[in-house]
Amino acid sequence: MYDALTGRFTFACPARGEARVTLSAFRQLERLPGAAHPAVYRVLFECGCGEEHEGLVSHDDLDWAPLGLDGGVFFNFMTSKLDSVAAELEDAAVRRLQAGEWPWSFFCYPEERPRPVFPSSFFLLAPGDGSLGLAVQCPACQRTSVNLVSHQHVDVPWHNDAEIRVVEHLFAEDRARMIEEFREELYSARFDARRIDI
Ligand SMILES: [Zn+2]
Ligand SMILES: [Zn+2]
């Protein structure tokens, strides 16, 4: 599903048989109800054939495979610590996490602070003028922020943009309304650049 060498997810494409795409080619992510362990996400992605298709990604593939880990690690967002299961793993990614380095981060606008995050908290992505509009549901406060980031910020774990742009807007709680607002705000150019030191 995820190939760590190329940093790509493999999905089915009705035209080409197979599509290999990076995380930044995802357009929508939605956690499926029911399957709690492991959680499964329905993904809408932009395919190289020019169409958008749906695919399924497990939580482990989404958050841990890009780090070279296959699950079993749990990050506690309330304490900002990895849970004890990680202590037994001798892995470079785990050591970096324990040292407080973050593979992904975003700027939470309602809280006015940068926060660590994992891709399962991303839920809308839209390509813009060279950058990527990224809607994140904050794992700490549950509210939505939209950041403008580089493709590497999303695709390359441990690459965090030093500065990102933040949409200055408090988004609706309701998903359908939120998606509408996301599109409106993304093209309104009401952004503010924030430093993100993580
Ligand atoms: Zn396709
Ligand atoms: Zn927050």
Image (spheres, rainbow, N blue to C red):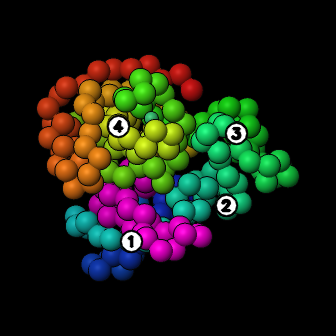
**Label 1 vs label 4, nearer the camera:** 4
Q: Which of 147 and 77 is in front in this view?
A: 77
Q: Residue 71 carries which label?
A: 2
- Can you tell me whether the CB of the residue at mark 2 lies under 8 Å from the nearest atom of ligand 2? no
Dot 1 and dot 2 residues touching (CB under 8 Å)? no
Q: Could you tell me how far apart the alpha carbons at marks 2 and 4 are, in whole angstroms? A: 27 Å
Q: Which of marks 4 and 3 is nearer the N terminus?
A: 3
- Can you tell me whether the CB of the residue at mark 4 lies under 8 Å from the nearest atom of ligand 2? yes
Q: Could you tell me how far apart the alpha carbons at marks 1 and 4 are, in whole angstroms? A: 25 Å
Reading the image, the residue beneath label 1 is: 55
Q: Main secondary structure of the magenta part?
A: strand
Reading the image, the residue beneath label 3 is: 81
Question: Which span of residues is magenta-colored?
Answer: 22-46
Q: Earlier in the sequence, mark 2 or mark 3?
A: 2
Q: Which amino acid does label 2 sit on?
A: Gly
Q: What residue type is labelled 1?
A: Gly
**Label 1 vs label 2, nearer the camera:** 2
Q: In which quarter of the image is residue 168?
A: top left
How crowded pointer 2 is (Cα within 10 Å; few <14, some 14-19, many 20+) is rated as: some
